Image (cartoon, grey):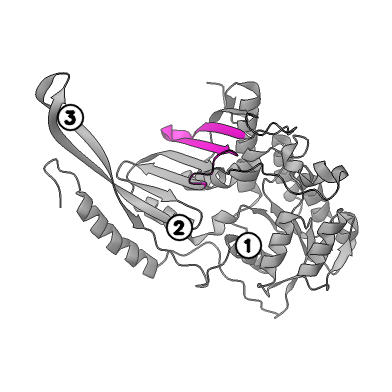
Amino acid sequence: MKDNNGLVSRRHFIASSSLMLAGMAAFPAELPFGSYRSVSGESIRLGIIGVGSRGSGIANILRNLPALEVVACCDIISEHLQHGLDITGGTATAYSDYRRLLDDRSVQAVIIALPEHLHYPVACAALDAGKHVYLEKTMAHSIEEADDLARFVKNYPQLVLQVGHQYRYFALYHKIAEIMERGWLGEVLQYECQYHRNSDWRRPVPRPELERQINWRMYKEYSGGLMTELCSHQVDIVNWLTGSHPLRVTAIGGIDYWKDGRETYDNIRALYEYPDGVKASVSSILSNAYKGYSLRILGTKATIEVQQSKAFIYGESVKKELTTVDGVTGATAESWGQGEAVPIDFVTPDGENRDPTAYALLDFAACIQTGKKPFSNVETGRESAIAVHLANKAADTGAFQQWPGLPEG
């Protein structure tokens, strides 16, 4: 049904979209990953290097994934190490030196959940030790490290290196990619990404001397801050959905609210330019949590808004009205209105409502067993790492940053 201007009416869009989305949920697209099924019946034996907030969170998820068994934990902070051991029920071997864990022949694969500046050297050491690697994002602490790790992995074709961009394993985003491929959004030229919080983003410190070890995200020596720790998730998704990487980026950031000795920004806004005129704005702030995590995909026919665990599609409603324009009664003006929200339904690979990290870990196990390439791999991880580090560099220098190897302009 069309209105007098030949455009799809809002009511018709909502009705037809609901039916189509229901049909798509019933017949989901084949995902590039799935549930792990052991051929031998044995679990893959894991060591977790770094059992702070993220590492212990992964350890908790692994308790419900029998395909993977935590047999070793490592951390230099005794409280973290004990917490990791408690999660495993005290059955894992404890290490305070990751090199000792890498020497443990019972360990087949490692999860590296260390501060960002240690990702590259520990991943290289783990590959040298013959271990499969699940490496938390952001993959490396610099563009140079990201490039070098991508080259280094080629020396170990028999080993798996997967990067922890877990939203690539969230079925919701695969449903969104299918909707885009079917052309329901029309031409997509704009993405708006935010990851906002209202907190100082600090972790409690049991002893003053542990400040920089526990709150490493606040210091440039150890972390790229908001861009690498938060925004990298959405930058990685935009890279995937566009099938490309940015051409250049400009950004501005500052320490304007939490003036507490931190070195990484408490707010940053970046604007990326992709091929074919596509733009992506990315922001992260620590002084307001309105809509917190949000990704908006703006097409000429419709918009998708992605929240933390759900998404909605909105049809574009365009009509012409007679009104007073520049003092001339009866002149024509165009008014734009957003359609009503239609929820996007999706089906997980196993029908369970797991954390996206669980599906990423199951794919890690499947890749180890079958030798297939992870959906989030060293090449996609490299591109996401370069993109976020370029944004930080743009904010630091006040100058546009080009993708390495591309001509200026």
Q: Secondary structure at mark 3?
A: strand
| Residue at numbered disc 2 | 310
Residue closest to the far bottom = 41
Contact? badges 3 and 1 (CB < 8 Å): no
Residue 14's x, y, as percent? 26, 56
Q: Is residue 281 magenta?
A: yes
**Closer to the camera: disc 2 or disc 1?**
2
Q: Is residue 117 left or right of residue 279?
A: right
Q: Identify the amino acid type marked 3.
A: Ala
Q: Is residue 96 magenta?
A: no
Q: Which residues are magenta?
A: 267-292
Observer-nearest of 314 and 350 = 314
Q: Identify the amino acid type marked 1.
A: Lys
**Closer to the camera: disc 3 or disc 1?**
3
Residue found 60% across the figure and 32% down from its top: 391
Q: Identify the amino acid type marked 2.
A: Lys
Q: Which mark is residue 372?
A: 1
Residue 163's x, y, as percent? 66, 52
Residue 389's x, y, as percent? 65, 35
Residue found 73% across the figure and 38% down from its top: 218
Please tell me whether residue 408 is drawn above or below residue 379 in the rendered image: above
Is residue 183 in view from this perspective?
no
| Residue at numbered disc 3 | 333
